[in-house]
Amino acid sequence: MVRVHVGQPCPARSAGQGMVAGDRPPDKVMAAMKIFSGTSNRPLAGRIAAYVGIELGAVDINRFPDGETFVKIRDNIRGCDVFIVQSICTQPNEMLMELLIMIDAMRRASARRITAVLPYFGYARQDRKDQPRVPITAKLVANLLVAAGANRVLTVDLHAQQIQGFFDIPVDHLYASPAIVKYLRELNLADPVVVSPDTGGVKAAYAYAKMLGTGIAIVAKQRTGLDVEAYSVVGDVENKDVVMVDDMATTCGTICAAAKLLLERGAASVRAAVTHATITEQGVERLRQSPVKELVVTDTVPIRETGDLPVTVLPVGDLLGEAVLRIHNDQSVSSLFHL
């Protein structure tokens, strides 16, 4: 059961609105803005365009019989400030190649600037060489985007902060935490505590705890092959409403193992809040059998049907739309990081 949470709607904005005095020279001539969408998350792209106050650009994306991707831009984009919305998810290889071809087509069509809007940056988990003879695929993807012709990147909740340094072009890194924290506050939990389901997420959990004004706890885990065995909890969770936070969930092994352990340690309830719900069928089945009371996610990736599992989807179209406007108008996006 997927429930889309709708907060206070933001009014549609035009590409010229929202200017702050001193942000740019008054005599600067702004290029026309165009927003295009790949096939990975067109509904989110539509919400971004609606917030900005323009229609999505016309583009044909087809597959040849042998599987090759063909792209044709229907709109005239010569001299335009172009934004391409594409999450590298579901079929990441297909979606990445589609994005690269779109960027190349727009560069050859004389777009003035091309911004790759990646609500979800795929391959982000392959961000370091942690064993012999393995790639750093996140760096490879960064190189491919630059080589294709992207001038800047806009993304949400990277798996690792250092990925920003993989690019030799500007990267605007947004956070979904303001939207998630706002929803969690509306729940009015009796005695909440923020929990990191593994030691790698402690910094993010601390940020959430600070915004919510709660304590923090950590679940230490041990991986055994593809499975995860949670084995200890650091911090007080007894009789508390636990909110586990993470940047993504796929097979949900970590979340489910941690939830079971937290209830064994006396937690009153367990919720999970993740930005990117790249959940597989195995993940859905695990969540159904787990004690997780609610899964809170955003719409950075399309949400898989979860049946009777309670899932709340928080929209980030307004957040990305405002960032697109500010990038187009040469304004700061740093204020979007806060509540």
Image (cartoon, rainbow, N blue to C red):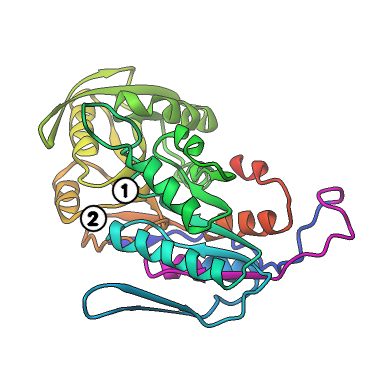
Looking at the image, which residue sits at the far right? 27
Earlier in the chain: of badge 2 and badge 1, it is 1
The kind of residue tagged 2 is Leu
Q: Nearer the viewer, residue 164 or 46?
A: 164
Q: Which residue is found at the position 28% from the left and 72% from the top? A: 68
Q: Which residue is found at the position 69% from the left and 59% from the top? A: 328
> For the residues marked 2 and 1, what is the alpha-carbon distance in whole angstroms?
8 Å
Secondary element at image label 2: loop
- What is the crowding at mark 1: few (fewer than 14 residues within 10 Å), some, or many (at least 20)? many
The kind of residue tagged 1 is Leu
Dots 2 and 1: beta carbons under 8 Å? yes
Magenta residue span: 21-46
Q: Which residue is mark 2?
A: 309
Residue 90 appears in the rendering: no
Q: Does the magenta run of residues contain 38?
A: yes
Q: Does the magenta run of residues contain 73?
A: no
Q: Nearer the viewer, residue 294 or 253?
A: 253
Picture layout, residue 207 above or below residue 156? above
Secondary element at image label 1: strand
Q: Which residue is mark 1?
A: 295
Picture layout, residue 248 above or below residue 29? above
